[in-house]
Amino acid sequence: MNVGKTLSAQIMEYVPRKNFGRIIDRYGGDAGARTLSCADLFREMAFAQLTWREPLRDIEVCLSANQSKLLSAPPNV
């Protein structure tokens, strides 16, 4: 049983969160967001890419199944 970080969590460590947050703020990325922030959406789409998901239905099913792992990720900024 793996007790370490997931692969997606390890890869997300390489994303400069502070810079990413500044870019979102500069361009008003979260201005019209209703449910997901830009940072959350980026994490989810990166996860979909890493797990070879293509159709939106497949991404939705996979994210629902891994929701607890994604919610336990550290804050984005």
Image: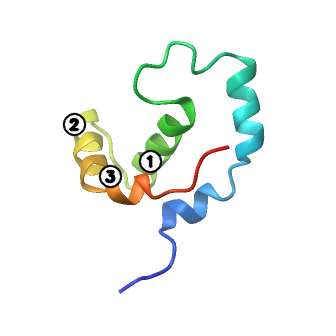
> Could you tell which of marks 2 and 1 lies nearer the N-terminus?
1
**Residue shown at the point (26%, 40%) measured from the top left:** 60
Indicate which label's residue lies in the foreground, 1 or 3.
Answer: 3
Residue 26 image position (x, y, % from top left): 75, 20
**Residue 16: assigned label:** none
For badge 2, the amino acid type reads Arg
Residue type marked 1:
Gln
In the rendered structure, the answer to whether residue 10 lies left or right of residue 24 reads left
Q: Secondary structure at mark 3?
A: helix
Which residue is painted at 42% across and 19% down in the image? Answer: 34
Q: Secondary structure at mark 1?
A: helix
Q: Which mark is residue 67?
A: 3
Residue located beneath label 1 in the image: 49
The amino acid sitting under disc 3 is Gln
How far is disc 2 from disc 1 in space, using C-alphas? 14 Å
Residue 57: which numbered mark, if any? 2
In which image quadrant can residue 29 be found? top right
Spatial CA distance of label 1 from label 3 is: 16 Å
Instruction: Name the spot of residue 31 as percent of width and height, x first.
Output: 57, 14
